[in-house]
Image (cartoon, rainbow, N blue to C red):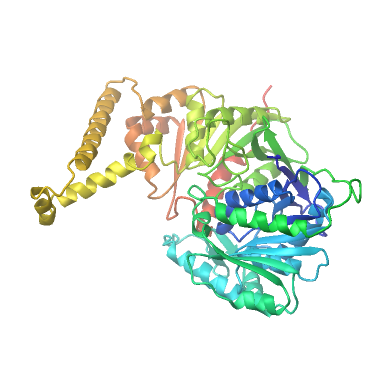
C-alpha cells in the first residue's frame, strides 16, 4: 500500500486560511481521481477511520484520492461559527478537486460524499466540466430534514442542564458538540437535492442504507436529469457511524465503491506517458494567522500536527495532546485544534498526536488498528516528547489527554518518561487489563453479578434451578471472579495502610510521579466515574498530595465525559488556559 501524504492547500481565500487534506496516490497514471467529502460534525468524527479506508481502496484500485477537511472543520482554518458555512464547504470541495488535479495530474474527478458530504459533493460537482461521476453514500437529500435529525440527536443525548452561571448562546443550535449558527441553519433549510436543475455528473453510484426503507426520490430525480445511475443497497452504514472506538470499516461498501471507480476510470483514456503536467509535491506546512502548523511524522509511523508561533520565544512549553479514545488528533468536538492554536499563539509548541493505530497513524507490527489501550503507547509518547524537546526555545514539556489519553500520559510518567507535568481529563481507568475490558471481563463481571444476585430473589429462577434448567457453571464462574476481585482489593487496601507498595497501587504511583517533580493535574466532569476511582484507588494519598500542591483536582459542573455541551467546552478551555497560558520563565 502506498503511504498517504498529508498536505495543506489554499483556495481563493486568504493565505492564512488553508485547508488540510490527505493525498492517496495510485501506483501509476490514472485519468480520474476521487475527492472524499466528509459528513458534518460528530458524524465526521465517527466516520474518519472508515473514510480513510475508502480512500485507500480507491488508490489500490488505481484511482488517486484526496480526503480533506472543509473550511472551519478538522485541521483546516476557521470554525463552525464563521459566516457562510455551507458556501465555504462547497467551495472547499471544489478547491480540493483542483488540488487533486494538480497533485495527481488527473484530468477528471469523481466527488464522493457521505451523509451531508453527499449533498456537498453534488453541489460542488454541479456546473464543473471535469466531473466524471458522483458517489453518494446514505446522502442527506433535504437540509431541513437533516436539521431535524441533528436536533433529535441532541435531545437524545440527555445532556445535563448548564449551571445557572454558565453563558449559553441561545441563538445557535448545538449538534452533538458542534455548532449550527442561524445563518448555517437557514442555508441548509433552503437546500434540497431534489431541486437540482441539471445533471451534476454524467454517472453516479447511489448507496442506500440497508437498515431503513429506501426512498426513490433522489434516484428518480438524478435519472430524470440524465444521470447514468447505479443504485445499490448495502450493509455497513450503522457500524460505520458508531462512536470512533467501536466503528467498523464497511467492507462491502468499500469494495463496491472501489469497483465502481475502477470501471469509471476504465471508460476514460489513460494519459500517455509524459503527457500533461507531472504530479506535484504536497505542501506540509501552512500559516494560520500568528501560528504555523506542520504535518509531522514521528519515526515515519506516527502522525501529528505541530503548532508553533510564527516567532518562537525562549523559555516556552512543549505540549503533547493525546487521543481521547479512538478520536483522531482533532480531539472530541474538535477541541484539540482550538486548544493547540490558542496555546501556539501564546508562544508554546503543541503537538496533537495520533497514537499508533489510531486516526492517521499506522499500527506498529503485531498491533491491530483502532486499539485504544495499545501497549506501545508509552514508546509513542516518548518519541513524540523528543520531537517537542527539539523545538527551539522549549524548556518544559507536558502531556494532556482526555480519557485514555490521560491514562497513557500518566502511565508514561510512571514509567519514568521525563515530563514536567501531566494533565488527565476524565480518565476512566488507572489499571487497564485487556481481559477486563472485553466480553466477560471486569465490566461484564460487575453486571453479571448484579443480575444473578437480583435473580436470587426471583421465584421463577428458583423453579428453574430445582428443575435442572440452569447452567450452574456460568454463575459460579462469575461469582468466583467477583469474590477474588474483592479479596484482592481488600488485601491491597491493607497493604497501602501498612505503607507497602503492591501491584496496581495508584497511591504508590501518584507518590512516585510527584516525587520526581512531575506536576499532576486532574480535571473531571462532575459525576464522572474517574473521580471516584481516583479517590478509591488513591486513598488518603490523594488528599495529602493535594495539600502539598503537588496534585491538583478541578471539577467542572454539569458536563459529560467528552464535554459535549458548548458551555462546558468553554469551561474546560478556561480551566486549561489558566494552567497553560502563562509562559514559563526561561531557564539558564
Note whether 84 is above or below 297 in the view shown.
below
- Residue found 55% across the figure and 38% down from its top: 400
Please identify the quadrant where the N terminus is shown.
top right
Note whether 57 is above or below 357 in the view shown.
below
Note whether 319 is above or below 118 in the view shown.
above
Left or right placement of residue 327 versus residue 275 in this view: left
Residue 424 visible somewhere in the drawing: no
- Residue found 27% across the figure and 31% down from its top: 489
Foreground: 570 or 467? 467
Foreground: 257 or 489? 257
Q: Position of residue 48 (x, y in %)?
A: 60, 51
Left or right placement of residue 295 versus residue 256 in this view: right
Quarter of the figure with residue 139: bottom right
Q: Position of residue 89 (x, y in %)?
A: 70, 63
Left or right placement of residue 539 versus residue 569 in this view: left
Foreground: 137 or 275? 275
Quarter of the figure with residue 37: bottom right
Left or right placement of residue 493 versus residue 556 in this view: left
Q: Position of residue 169 (x, y in %)?
A: 55, 66
Q: Position of residue 347 (x, y in %)?
A: 70, 39
Residue 572 visible somewhere in the drawing: yes
- Residue found 32% across the figure and 39% down from its top: 442
Please identify the quadrant where the C terminus is shown.
top right
- Residue found 68% across the figure and 80% down from its top: 195
Q: State the count of labels.
A: 0
Foreground: 109 or 417? 109
Amino acid at each position: 500500500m502506498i503511504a498517504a501524504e498529508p498536505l495543506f492547500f489554499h483556495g481563493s481565500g486568504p493565505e492564512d486560511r488553508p485547508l488540510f487534506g490527505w493525498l492517496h496516490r495510485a501506483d501509476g497514471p490514472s485519468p480520474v481521481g476521487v475527492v472524499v467529502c466528509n459528513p458534518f460534525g460528530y458524524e465526521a468524527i465517527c466516520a474518519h477511520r472508515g473514510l480513510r479506508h475508502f480512500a485507500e481502496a480507491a488508490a489500490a484500485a488505481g484511482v488517486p484520492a484526496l480526503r480533506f477537511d472543509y473550511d472551519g472543520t478538522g485541521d483546516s482554518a476557521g470554525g463552525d461559527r464563521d459566516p457562510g458555512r455551507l458556501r465555504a464547504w462547497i467551495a472547499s470541495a471544489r478547491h480540493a478537486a483542483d488540488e487533486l488535479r494538480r497533485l495527481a495530474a488527473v484530468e477528471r474527478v469523481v466527488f464522493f460524499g457521505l451523509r451531508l458530504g453527499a449533498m456537498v459533493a453534488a453541489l460542488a460537482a454541479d456546473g464543473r466540466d471535469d466531473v466524471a461521476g458522483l458517489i453518494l453514500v446514505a446522502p442527506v437529500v433535504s437540509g431541513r430534514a437533516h436539521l431535524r435529525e441533528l436536533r433529535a440527536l441532541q435531545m437524545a443525548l440527555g445532556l445535563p442542564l448548564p449551571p445557572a452561571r454558565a453563558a449559553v448562546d441561545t441563538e445557535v443550535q448545538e449538534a452533538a458538540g458542534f455548532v449550527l449558527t442561524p445563518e448555517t441553519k437557514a442555508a441548509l433549510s433552503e437546500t434540497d437535492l431534489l431541486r437540482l436543475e441539471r445533471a451534476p455528473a454524467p454517472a453516479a453510484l447511489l448507496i442506500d442504507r440497508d437498515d431503513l426503507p429506501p426512498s426513490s426520490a433522489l434516484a428518480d430525480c438524478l435519472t430524470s436529469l440524465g444521470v447514468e445511475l447505479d443504485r445499490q443497497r448495502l450493509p455497513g452504514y450503522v457500524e460505520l457511524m458508531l462512536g470512533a472506538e467501536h466503528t467498523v470499516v464497511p467492507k462491502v461498501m468499500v469494495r463496491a465503491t472501489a469497483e465502481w471507480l475502477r470501471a469509471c476510470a476504465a471508460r476514460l483514456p489513460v494519459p500517455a506517458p509524459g503527457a500533461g503536467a507531472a504530479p506535484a509535491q504536497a505542501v506540509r506546512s501552512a500559516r494560520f494567522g500568528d501560528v504555523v502548523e506542520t504535518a509531522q511524522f514521528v519515526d515515519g509511523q506516527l502522525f501529528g500536527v505541530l503548532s508553533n508561533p510564527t516567532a518562537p520565544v525562549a523559555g516556552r512549553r512543549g505540549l503533547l495532546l493525546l487521543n481521547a479514545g479512538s478520536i483522531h488528533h482533532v480531539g472530541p468536538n474538535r477541541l484539540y485544534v482550538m486548544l493547540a492554536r490558542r496555546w501556539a499563539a501564546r508562544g508554546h509548541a503543541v503537538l496533537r498526536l495520533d497514537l499508533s493505530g489510531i486516526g492517521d497513524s499506522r499500527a506498529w507490527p503485531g498491533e491491530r488498528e483502532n486499539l485504544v489501550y495499545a501497549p506501545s503507547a508509552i514508546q509513542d509518547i516518548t518519541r513524540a516528547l523528543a520531537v517537542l524537546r527539539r523545538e527551539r526555545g522549549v524548556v518544559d514539556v507536558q502531556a494532556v489527554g482526555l480519557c485514555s489519553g490521560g491514562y497513557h500520559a500518566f502511565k508514561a510518567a510512571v514509567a519514568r518518561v521525563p515530563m514536567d507535568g501531566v494533565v488527565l481529563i476524565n480518565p476512566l481507568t488507572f489499571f487497564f487489563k485487556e481481559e477486563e475490558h472485553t466480553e466477560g471481563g471486569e465490566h461484564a463481571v460487575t453486571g453479571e453479578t448484579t443480575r444473578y444476585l437480583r435473580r436470587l430473589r426471583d421465584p421463577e429462577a428458583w423453579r428453574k434451578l430445582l428443575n435442572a434448567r440452569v447452567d450452574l457453571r456460568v454463575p459460579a464462574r462469575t461469582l468466583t471472579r467477583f469474590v477474588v476481585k474483592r479479596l484482592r482489593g481488600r488485601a491491597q487496601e491493607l497493604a497501602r495502610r501498612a505503607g507497602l507498595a503492591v501491584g496496581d497501587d495508584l497511591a504508590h504511583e501518584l507518590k512516585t510521579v510527584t516525587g520526581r517533580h512531575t506536576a499532576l493535574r486532574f480535571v473531571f466532569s462532575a459525576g464522572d466515574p474517574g473521580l471516584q476511582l481516583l479517590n478509591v484507588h488513591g486513598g488518603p494519598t490523594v488528599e495529602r498530595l493535594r495539600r502539598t500542591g503537588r496534585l491538583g483536582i478541578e471539577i467542572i459542573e454539569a458536563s459529560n465525559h467528552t464535554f459535549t455541551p458548548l458551555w462546558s467546552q468553554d469551561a474546560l478551555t478556561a480551566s486549561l488556559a489558566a494552567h497553560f497560558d502563562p509562559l514559563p520563565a526561561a531557564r539558564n
